[in-house]
Amino acid sequence: MKMKRKREPVSFLTVEPECCHEAVQLWGNANNTRRQQSNLTEKARKHLSAMGWKFWYTLLKHGKTELRYESPTGKLYNSLRTACKAYMQSQGGGGVFSESIGSNSVGCSSSKVTAQSTSMERLQKRKVDESFKIEDQSPMPKRGKILADLKRLRDQKKANSQQDDISTVCQNDDQSDDICTVCHYGGELILCDKCPSAFHISCLGLKELADGDWLCPSCCCGMCGHGKFEEGSGEKPKDDMDNSMLICNQCEHKYHIGCLKNAGVVKLKWDSKGNWFCSRNCEDIFFSLNEILGKPILVGPDNLTWTLLKPSSSHSDREDLTENYRKLNLALSVMHECFEPSRDPYTKRDIVEDIIFNRESELSRLNFKRFYTIVLERDEELISVATVRIYMEVAEVPLVATRFHYRRLGMCGILMKELEKQLMKMGVGRLTLPSAPSALDTWTTSFGFSKMKVDERLQFLSYTLLDFQGTIMCHKLLRHSDTDGSTSANSTVTQAEDKQLENGALDHDRKFLIDDVDSMFLDINNPGFLSWHMGLG
């Protein structure tokens, strides 16, 4: 079935997320007469919002507007009933509701979730503590280590087995990837036994794999380096909770609760919004980003401003939210003005749009929820746009675009200079970018970047850095500010972290070389993936 061409949103409808599965069931059932009861519509929309759906109005002919329902996979629906039916089918219901609901009231969960989380853990149907983001490590159907040419046979057998115990955010997340997460090329791949990611053995710096289950770097504990927690001498944990993992809200590293206990972190703390951080560095970066989010910073004459944006914010009112999405759509138009749109072979979606609007996926290389968009503007006119993702010790800037009539005026340089300034305040020591071979000499000789060596790239396998086919990963070491840029907020890792930082149990490599190169700006020239244009300032 062909999809209709997506109309551009003219305004977004903010729906407070709240779980209410029964309301969606009633609305999706075409024969149910109770769906018109008061507040049932609102409850159904709230549940869809909690599951990551978005709602926006599009402009029709004669000036009329119509509400659209957009699923986490990007599919559009014109009515609440069709949206609810599609949601139920994605959950394995097939549009037929076997559960009989005889009550006149609709029972809804009182627990609220944030609009952007999309509750990936709930969709995976694993045992998850929603408030604390604890991911259960219970056994899943084994994927096994297989070659790429055998994967399709395995996927076909899996589809025929009628297993409905796994639901995911992305449409194809129940299938393993066809390209390597590191280099983005196909070939002979090994598959993670927990997530859909695939890798070349050589890209992992390995010669061979041991027998048994294998988990990719993103799925392993940041302390023990293993997928499953074990007591001393390889014994199974006495407490099942020890095998569960906490996910840092900034760097996205995962930690076994058992490993944290063994390290002396007995009392785990979260902030008021349920965020947990593995270190004070991650906590400081998180709060520093939120402090400048949406606030224009004056960086030049004639009201030239630099602003950090993200698709939504729970504390924004409707007017601010509408303005935020307006700027993000303008940023996307600037990207499309400069780059030929390209669709990822796995999702068939525009990857630039997915990055700007933080599309989520169980597949790590397509999970863009941590990206921010930077806009350089003057008097409401966008000049330059960049996308950035910041982990704890490294940041990446894969996309930068400048409108044609502002090129060679130094605008990208201004944007990047302010970004590097903010990164150094946060203690981030390294900035990475994928460079085309034709532009490599420019970055290395004129702008202070250097080609990332293989052993340097292997140090960051636990971070998913966005790369494109045909590009060369480059990096730049940033100078640290002499002033103390740490925030005054209390750490959520507790006092036990201080002791562990001394012996290195929770310490990541936070020491970086000092480089005297100036700030630079980025434009990638990769005809194999996107049509990038040089915008030297």
Image: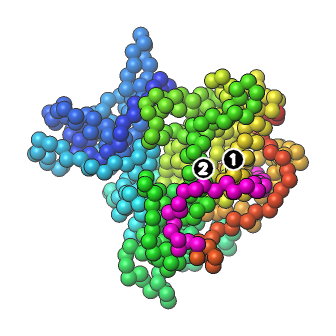
Q: Secondary structure at mark 2?
A: helix
- Give the spatial CA distance, label 1 vs label 2: 9 Å
Q: Which contiguous range is marked in magenta? A: 472-498
Q: Which residue is mark 1?
A: 422
**Residue positioned 54% across, 69% down in the render:** 220
Image quadrant where one finds the N terminus: top left
Q: Position of residue 457 (x, y in %)?
A: 72, 62
**Residue positioned 45% across, 68% down in the render:** 268
- Inspect the image, locate mark 1, and give the three-letter code of the amino acid beneath it: Gln
Verify CB contact (< 8 Å) between mark 1 and mark 2: yes
**Residue positioned 76% across, 23% down in the render:** 405
Q: Report if residue 163 lies within the magenta region.
A: no
> In this rendering, would 471 be left or right of 259?
right
Q: Earlier in the sequence, mark 1 or mark 2?
A: 2
Q: Nearer the viewer, residue 43 or 219?
A: 43
Q: Position of residue 291 (x, y in %)?
A: 57, 45
Q: Is residue 44 above or below residue 459?
A: above
Q: Secondary structure at mark 1?
A: helix
Q: Report if residue 495 lies within the magenta region.
A: yes
Q: Is residue 220 above or below residue 334?
A: below
